[in-house]
Image (cartoon, grey):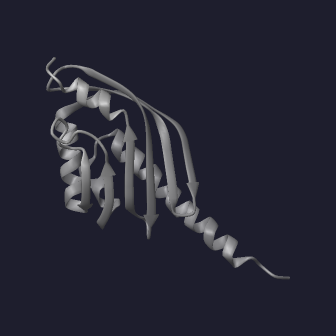
Amino acid sequence: MRFNTQHSIMTELTSQTQATIENFLKFLSIRNLNQITKLFSNEVDWFIPGDETKAPWLGKRSSRKEVEQFYDLLWSSTEPISAQISNILIDHENAVITGEFSTKMLQTGKIVSSLFCIVMIVENNLITKYRLLEDSYAVSKALSQQ
């Protein structure tokens, strides 16, 4: 009898990725800065496109410390209203999370509602790549005083 060890390694990798994603979502939902940042590699490939002049938390990051600064800035500038996860797709070290959210911009009191897609790579139980796609135009508009 021959066992497919490649399959069991990949299944274990998918399970590890799933555990990391579940922890990420748990710590995100309770805004636990210390625990969420521990999920990221010391070096990370991070990008959230958008108008960084209006929303300084957007843009590129490359270290765990910068990820911590992102969440600190985001959470001090916004108030969550609602979030719904539509799908979590995991294939080995790759993860994609889709859904919708509504957030109040504290600077203006305006509310942003958007679809989102988060793309991550998890290696050795740490997030090494992070992309968040959202309606960055709506975010920019909600931060405008007009």
Q: Position of residue 72 (x, y in %)?
A: 18, 45
Image location (x, y in percent) of residue 70: 22, 48
How many marks the image carries: the answer is: 0
Q: Residue at x 23, y 19 (%)?
A: 110
Residue at 69% x, 78% y: name it: 5
Question: 120 or 54, which is in the foreground?
Answer: 54
Q: Is residue 44 left or right of residue 12?
A: left
Q: Nearer the viewer, residue 121 or 30?
A: 121
Which quarter of the image is occupied by the C terminus? top left
Q: Is residue 15 above or below residue 84?
A: below
Left or right of 117 on screen, residue 89:
right
Q: Residue at x 51, y 54 (%)?
A: 95
Q: Where residue 115 sits in the image (x, y, percent)?
A: 44, 32
Q: Is residue 88 left or right of residue 78?
A: right
Pick the residue in front: 111 or 2: 111
What is the residue that sits farthest to the right in this orientation?
A: 1
> Residue lying farthest top?
146
Q: Tell me which corner region of the image, top left, top right, bottom left or bottom right, holds residue 75.
A: top left
**Quadrant of the frame with the N terminus:** bottom right
Residue in the picture at 28% in, 42% down: 31
Q: Is residue 53 left or right of residue 135?
A: left
Seen from the viewer's position, the closer of residues 138 and 76 is 138
x, y (%) of residue 60? 26, 54
